[in-house]
Protein backbone atom coordinates (compact mmCIF):
# COMPACT_ATOMS: atom_id res chain seq x y z
CA UNK A 1 0.00 0.00 0.00
CA UNK A 2 1.49 3.32 -1.01
CA UNK A 3 1.24 6.46 1.11
CA UNK A 4 -1.17 9.08 -0.03
CA UNK A 5 1.48 11.75 -0.05
CA UNK A 6 4.75 11.76 -1.78
CA UNK A 7 7.76 11.12 0.36
CA UNK A 8 9.28 14.34 -0.87
CA UNK A 9 6.32 16.50 0.21
CA UNK A 10 6.57 18.48 3.52
CA UNK A 11 10.13 17.44 4.15
CA UNK A 12 12.56 20.26 4.98
CA UNK A 13 15.69 20.48 3.04
CA UNK A 14 18.80 19.87 5.25
CA UNK A 15 21.97 21.82 4.74
CA UNK A 16 24.98 20.13 3.28
CA UNK A 17 27.07 20.82 6.39
CA UNK A 18 27.06 18.94 9.72
CA UNK A 19 23.96 18.71 11.85
CA UNK A 20 23.61 21.77 14.10
CA UNK A 21 22.06 19.82 16.90
CA UNK A 22 23.57 19.26 20.36
CA UNK A 23 26.95 17.63 20.41
CA UNK A 24 26.03 15.56 23.44
CA UNK A 25 24.11 12.99 21.35
CA UNK A 26 26.74 11.01 19.53
CA UNK A 27 25.85 8.69 16.75
CA UNK A 28 25.59 5.04 17.48
CA UNK A 29 28.74 3.02 17.28
CA UNK A 30 31.11 5.99 17.48
CA UNK A 31 32.76 7.39 20.68
CA UNK A 32 31.96 10.93 21.68
CA UNK A 33 34.33 13.58 20.45
CA UNK A 34 36.55 15.21 23.07
CA UNK A 35 35.32 18.47 24.50
CA UNK A 36 37.26 21.54 23.73
CA UNK A 37 37.48 24.35 26.26
CA UNK A 38 37.30 27.99 25.49
CA UNK A 39 40.11 29.39 23.47
CA UNK A 40 42.92 30.97 25.47
CA UNK A 41 45.16 33.76 24.43
CA UNK A 42 48.98 33.70 24.33
CA UNK A 43 49.14 29.95 24.86
CA UNK A 44 47.54 30.09 28.32
CA UNK A 45 45.60 27.03 29.36
CA UNK A 46 43.42 26.36 32.29
CA UNK A 47 44.87 23.94 34.72
CA UNK A 48 42.55 21.18 35.71
CA UNK A 49 42.66 21.00 39.51
CA UNK A 50 40.93 19.02 42.14
CA UNK A 51 37.35 19.87 42.95
CA UNK A 52 37.13 22.59 45.54
CA UNK A 53 35.29 22.00 48.76
CA UNK A 54 32.85 24.65 49.77
CA UNK A 55 33.93 26.43 52.96
CA UNK A 56 31.34 26.42 55.66
CA UNK A 57 30.39 29.50 57.58
CA UNK A 58 32.80 30.22 60.40
CA UNK A 59 35.45 27.78 59.12
CA UNK A 60 38.93 29.36 58.70
CA UNK A 61 40.29 29.56 55.22
CA UNK A 62 42.83 26.94 54.24
CA UNK A 63 46.37 28.24 53.78
CA UNK A 64 48.40 27.37 50.75
CA UNK A 65 51.28 24.94 50.93
CA UNK A 66 53.80 27.76 50.40
CA UNK A 67 52.90 29.43 53.67
CA UNK A 68 55.24 28.44 56.51
CA UNK A 69 54.15 28.45 60.12
CA UNK A 70 56.32 31.06 61.84
CA UNK A 71 56.70 30.68 65.60
CA UNK A 72 55.41 33.60 67.56
CA UNK A 73 58.05 35.68 69.29
CA UNK A 74 58.12 35.00 72.98
CA UNK A 75 57.88 38.16 75.01
CA UNK A 76 60.52 38.08 77.73
CA UNK A 77 59.58 40.08 80.82
CA UNK A 78 62.37 42.45 81.92
CA UNK A 79 64.40 41.55 84.96
CA UNK A 80 63.63 43.63 88.01
CA UNK A 81 66.29 46.14 89.02
CA UNK A 82 67.32 45.58 92.62
CA UNK A 83 68.05 49.06 93.91
CA UNK A 84 69.73 48.04 97.15
CA UNK A 85 72.06 45.73 95.26
CA UNK A 86 72.95 48.48 92.78
CA UNK A 87 73.77 50.85 95.66
CA UNK A 88 75.91 48.17 97.33
CA UNK A 89 77.90 47.54 94.15
CA UNK A 90 78.37 51.29 93.75
CA UNK A 91 79.77 51.50 97.27
CA UNK A 92 82.16 48.63 96.59
CA UNK A 93 83.39 50.31 93.38
CA UNK A 94 83.97 53.57 95.27
CA UNK A 95 85.92 51.85 98.07
CA UNK A 96 88.02 49.90 95.58
CA UNK A 97 88.88 53.06 93.66
CA UNK A 98 89.81 54.96 96.82
CA UNK A 99 92.01 52.11 98.00
CA UNK A 100 93.90 51.89 94.71
CA UNK A 101 94.38 55.66 94.44
CA UNK A 102 95.61 56.01 98.02
CA UNK A 103 97.86 52.99 97.59
CA UNK A 104 99.43 54.62 94.54
CA UNK A 105 100.27 57.68 96.65
CA UNK A 106 102.36 55.52 98.99
CA UNK A 107 104.56 54.40 96.12
CA UNK A 108 107.92 56.10 95.67
CA UNK A 109 111.47 55.38 94.52
CA UNK A 110 112.74 52.38 96.48
CA UNK A 111 109.43 52.13 98.29
CA UNK A 112 107.12 50.03 96.08
CA UNK A 113 106.24 47.17 98.40
CA UNK A 114 103.19 48.78 100.14
CA UNK A 115 101.55 49.45 96.79
CA UNK A 116 102.49 45.93 95.61
CA UNK A 117 100.76 44.40 98.65
CA UNK A 118 97.61 46.40 97.94
CA UNK A 119 97.65 45.28 94.31
CA UNK A 120 98.17 41.66 95.37
CA UNK A 121 95.11 41.83 97.64
CA UNK A 122 92.99 43.19 94.78
CA UNK A 123 94.33 40.46 92.51
CA UNK A 124 93.23 37.78 94.98
CA UNK A 125 89.75 39.33 95.06
CA UNK A 126 89.72 39.26 91.27
CA UNK A 127 90.70 35.58 91.15
CA UNK A 128 88.04 34.68 93.73
CA UNK A 129 85.24 36.58 92.02
CA UNK A 130 85.96 35.55 88.45
CA UNK A 131 86.67 31.88 89.10
CA UNK A 132 83.50 31.50 91.17
CA UNK A 133 81.42 33.32 88.58
CA UNK A 134 82.78 31.66 85.42
CA UNK A 135 83.62 28.29 87.02
CA UNK A 136 86.19 26.92 84.55
CA UNK A 137 87.17 23.22 84.67
CA UNK A 138 89.63 22.34 87.44
CA UNK A 139 88.58 25.48 89.30
CA UNK A 140 91.04 25.07 92.16
CA UNK A 141 93.93 24.50 89.76
CA UNK A 142 93.07 27.63 87.74
CA UNK A 143 92.64 29.70 90.92
CA UNK A 144 95.94 28.47 92.38
CA UNK A 145 97.90 29.11 89.19
CA UNK A 146 96.33 32.57 88.83
CA UNK A 147 97.28 33.47 92.40
CA UNK A 148 100.85 32.29 91.78
CA UNK A 149 101.00 34.33 88.57
CA UNK A 150 99.77 37.38 90.52
CA UNK A 151 102.58 37.05 93.04
CA UNK A 152 105.21 36.57 90.32
CA UNK A 153 103.88 39.55 88.36
CA UNK A 154 104.11 41.84 91.39
CA UNK A 155 107.64 40.67 92.16
CA UNK A 156 108.73 41.19 88.55
CA UNK A 157 107.13 44.65 88.42
CA UNK A 158 109.01 45.72 91.55
CA UNK A 159 112.38 44.01 91.06
CA UNK A 160 113.14 44.47 87.35
CA UNK A 161 115.82 47.01 86.51
CA UNK A 162 113.87 48.60 83.67
CA UNK A 163 110.17 49.25 84.11
CA UNK A 164 108.41 47.52 81.24
CA UNK A 165 105.60 45.14 80.34
CA UNK A 166 107.73 42.43 78.72
CA UNK A 167 108.18 40.31 81.90
CA UNK A 168 104.46 40.60 82.61
CA UNK A 169 103.63 39.37 79.11
CA UNK A 170 105.86 36.32 79.51
CA UNK A 171 104.25 35.50 82.86
CA UNK A 172 100.77 35.87 81.37
CA UNK A 173 101.56 33.43 78.55
CA UNK A 174 103.17 30.95 80.95
CA UNK A 175 100.31 31.15 83.41
CA UNK A 176 97.73 30.58 80.70
CA UNK A 177 99.54 27.50 79.38
CA UNK A 178 99.95 26.13 82.90
CA UNK A 179 96.25 26.61 83.63
CA UNK A 180 95.25 24.86 80.39
CA UNK A 181 97.60 21.95 81.09
CA UNK A 182 96.15 21.67 84.57
CA UNK A 183 92.71 21.31 83.07
CA UNK A 184 93.90 18.64 80.63
CA UNK A 185 95.19 16.34 83.39
CA UNK A 186 91.78 15.05 84.47
CA UNK A 187 89.60 13.32 81.89
CA UNK A 188 86.45 14.87 83.34
CA UNK A 189 87.80 18.38 82.87
CA UNK A 190 89.40 17.58 79.51
CA UNK A 191 86.00 17.48 77.81
CA UNK A 192 85.18 21.08 78.75
CA UNK A 193 88.62 22.60 78.35
CA UNK A 194 88.00 23.89 74.81
CA UNK A 195 84.87 25.70 75.97
CA UNK A 196 86.67 27.32 78.89
CA UNK A 197 89.75 28.69 77.14
CA UNK A 198 88.23 32.18 77.04
CA UNK A 199 87.37 32.11 80.74
CA UNK A 200 90.84 30.91 81.70
CA UNK A 201 92.48 33.56 79.53
CA UNK A 202 90.34 36.34 81.05
CA UNK A 203 91.24 35.32 84.59
CA UNK A 204 94.99 35.15 83.94
CA UNK A 205 95.11 38.34 81.87
CA UNK A 206 93.01 40.23 84.43
CA UNK A 207 95.45 39.29 87.17
CA UNK A 208 98.40 40.46 85.08
CA UNK A 209 96.60 43.69 84.13
CA UNK A 210 96.62 44.88 87.74
CA UNK A 211 100.39 44.48 87.76
CA UNK A 212 100.72 47.23 85.14
CA UNK A 213 99.84 49.74 87.86
CA UNK A 214 103.06 48.88 89.70
CA UNK A 215 105.05 49.32 86.49
CA UNK A 216 103.27 52.62 85.83
CA UNK A 217 104.15 53.90 89.30
CA UNK A 218 107.86 53.59 88.41
CA UNK A 219 107.52 55.88 85.36
CA UNK A 220 107.79 59.69 85.69
CA UNK A 221 104.29 61.14 86.02
CA UNK A 222 102.98 57.60 86.33
CA UNK A 223 101.60 58.06 89.84
CA UNK A 224 99.67 61.12 88.73
CA UNK A 225 98.34 59.16 85.73
CA UNK A 226 97.18 56.41 88.08
CA UNK A 227 95.42 59.00 90.22
CA UNK A 228 93.62 60.57 87.27
CA UNK A 229 92.65 57.33 85.51
CA UNK A 230 91.57 55.33 88.55
CA UNK A 231 89.66 58.27 89.99
CA UNK A 232 87.80 58.65 86.70
CA UNK A 233 87.11 54.91 86.60
CA UNK A 234 85.89 54.76 90.20
CA UNK A 235 83.61 57.78 89.77
CA UNK A 236 82.25 56.37 86.49
CA UNK A 237 81.45 52.97 87.99
CA UNK A 238 79.87 54.51 91.10
CA UNK A 239 77.71 57.00 89.20
CA UNK A 240 76.62 54.33 86.70
CA UNK A 241 75.43 51.98 89.44
CA UNK A 242 73.74 54.73 91.43
CA UNK A 243 71.91 55.89 88.31
CA UNK A 244 70.71 52.34 87.71
CA UNK A 245 69.29 52.32 91.22
CA UNK A 246 67.32 55.52 90.56
CA UNK A 247 66.64 55.55 86.80
CA UNK A 248 67.47 52.31 84.95
CA UNK A 249 66.23 53.67 81.62
CA UNK A 250 66.28 52.96 78.75
CA UNK A 251 66.88 49.28 79.36
CA UNK A 252 69.70 47.93 77.23
CA UNK A 253 68.33 44.38 77.35
CA UNK A 254 65.37 42.82 79.21
CA UNK A 255 67.64 40.25 80.89
CA UNK A 256 70.26 42.79 82.06
CA UNK A 257 69.22 45.12 84.91
CA UNK A 258 71.17 48.07 83.51
CA UNK A 259 70.14 51.27 81.79
CA UNK A 260 71.81 53.39 79.14
CA UNK A 261 71.41 56.51 81.27
CA UNK A 262 73.78 55.09 83.90
CA UNK A 263 76.45 54.15 81.37
CA UNK A 264 76.43 57.56 79.71
CA UNK A 265 76.21 59.52 82.96
CA UNK A 266 79.04 57.52 84.52
CA UNK A 267 81.39 58.13 81.58
CA UNK A 268 80.57 61.85 81.49
CA UNK A 269 80.98 62.46 85.22
CA UNK A 270 84.20 60.43 85.29
CA UNK A 271 85.64 62.52 82.45
CA UNK A 272 84.63 65.75 84.18
CA UNK A 273 86.32 64.61 87.39
CA UNK A 274 89.56 63.81 85.57
CA UNK A 275 89.52 67.26 83.92
CA UNK A 276 89.14 68.90 87.32
CA UNK A 277 92.06 66.88 88.69
CA UNK A 278 94.16 67.88 85.70
CA UNK A 279 93.74 71.53 86.56
CA UNK A 280 95.34 70.97 89.99
CA UNK A 281 98.20 68.67 88.94
CA UNK A 282 101.59 69.89 87.79
CA UNK A 283 103.06 69.55 84.30
CA UNK A 284 102.84 67.66 82.03
CA UNK A 285 99.18 67.47 83.03
CA UNK A 286 96.63 69.93 81.72
CA UNK A 287 92.84 69.80 81.96
CA UNK A 288 92.65 68.68 78.32
CA UNK A 289 95.16 65.88 78.66
CA UNK A 290 93.65 64.72 81.92
CA UNK A 291 90.18 64.76 80.34
CA UNK A 292 91.37 62.64 77.40
CA UNK A 293 93.07 59.94 79.47
CA UNK A 294 90.26 60.04 82.02
CA UNK A 295 87.68 59.57 79.28
CA UNK A 296 89.44 56.47 77.96
CA UNK A 297 89.75 54.96 81.44
CA UNK A 298 86.15 55.77 82.42
CA UNK A 299 84.64 54.38 79.23
CA UNK A 300 86.76 51.24 79.48
CA UNK A 301 85.71 50.63 83.07
CA UNK A 302 82.00 51.24 82.48
CA UNK A 303 81.83 49.07 79.36
CA UNK A 304 83.71 46.27 81.10
CA UNK A 305 81.24 46.38 83.97
CA UNK A 306 78.36 46.29 81.48
CA UNK A 307 79.90 43.34 79.61
CA UNK A 308 80.08 41.41 82.88
CA UNK A 309 76.33 41.97 83.32
CA UNK A 310 75.63 40.58 79.86
CA UNK A 311 77.83 37.54 80.54
CA UNK A 312 76.01 36.86 83.81
CA UNK A 313 72.63 37.11 82.07
CA UNK A 314 73.83 34.68 79.39
CA UNK A 315 74.89 32.12 82.00
CA UNK A 316 71.54 32.37 83.76
CA UNK A 317 69.65 31.94 80.47
CA UNK A 318 71.78 28.89 79.66
CA UNK A 319 70.58 27.27 82.88
CA UNK A 320 73.79 27.48 84.88
CA UNK A 321 73.27 27.54 88.62
CA UNK A 322 74.55 30.81 90.14
CA UNK A 323 77.10 30.36 92.91
CA UNK A 324 78.59 32.62 95.57
CA UNK A 325 76.32 35.67 95.42
CA UNK A 326 78.90 38.13 96.79
CA UNK A 327 81.67 37.08 94.38
CA UNK A 328 79.42 37.34 91.33
CA UNK A 329 78.49 40.94 92.09
CA UNK A 330 82.09 41.91 92.81
CA UNK A 331 83.01 40.75 89.32
CA UNK A 332 81.87 43.89 87.48
CA UNK A 333 83.87 46.58 89.36
CA UNK A 334 86.94 44.35 89.56
CA UNK A 335 86.80 43.74 85.82
CA UNK A 336 86.38 47.45 85.18
CA UNK A 337 89.49 48.41 87.14
CA UNK A 338 91.44 45.50 85.64
CA UNK A 339 90.95 46.86 82.12
CA UNK A 340 91.34 50.49 83.17
CA UNK A 341 94.88 49.74 84.45
CA UNK A 342 96.48 48.88 81.06
CA UNK A 343 94.42 51.66 79.46
CA UNK A 344 96.04 54.10 81.91
CA UNK A 345 99.48 52.75 81.06
CA UNK A 346 98.85 53.11 77.31
CA UNK A 347 97.49 56.65 77.61
CA UNK A 348 100.41 57.68 79.79
CA UNK A 349 102.86 56.43 77.15
CA UNK A 350 100.99 58.18 74.34
CA UNK A 351 100.03 61.55 75.85
CA UNK A 352 102.51 62.25 78.66
Image (cartoon, rainbow, N blue to C red):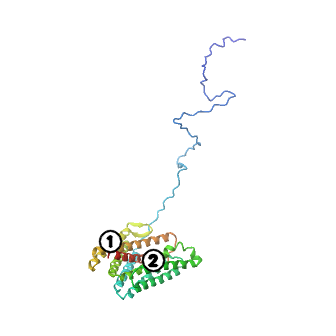
Q: Earlier in the sequence, mark 1 or mark 2?
A: 2
Considering only vertical position in the picture, is 102 above or below 332?
A: below
SS assignment at label 2: helix
**Which one is nearer the viewer's eye here, 197 or 84?**
197
Residue 264's image quarter? bottom left
Circles 1 and 2, Cβ within 8 Å, touching? The answer is no
- Picture coordinates of residue 100, whole percent (x, y): 37, 82
Residue 303's image quarter? bottom left
**Which one is nearer the viewer's eye here, 104 or 307?**
104
Considering only vertical position in the picture, is 23 above or below 301?
A: above
Give the label on residue 268, or none: 1
- Reading the image, the residue beneath label 2 is 205
Asked if one can make out residue 272 in the rendered structure from this viewpoint, the answer is: no
Residue occupying the point 35% across, 78% down = 230
SS assignment at label 1: helix
- Picture coordinates of residue 343, whole percent (x, y): 38, 75
Amino acid sequence: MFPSTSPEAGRESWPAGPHPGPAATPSRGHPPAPRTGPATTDGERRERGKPRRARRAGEPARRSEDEVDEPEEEVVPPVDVRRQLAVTIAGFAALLGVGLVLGAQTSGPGHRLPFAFIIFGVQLLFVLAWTMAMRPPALLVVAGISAAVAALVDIAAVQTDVAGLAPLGYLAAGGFLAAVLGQLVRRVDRVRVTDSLGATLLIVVGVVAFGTLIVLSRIPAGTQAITVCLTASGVALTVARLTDAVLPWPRLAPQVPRGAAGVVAGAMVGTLTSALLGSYLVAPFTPTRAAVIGLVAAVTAVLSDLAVGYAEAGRLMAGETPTMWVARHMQGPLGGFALAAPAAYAMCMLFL
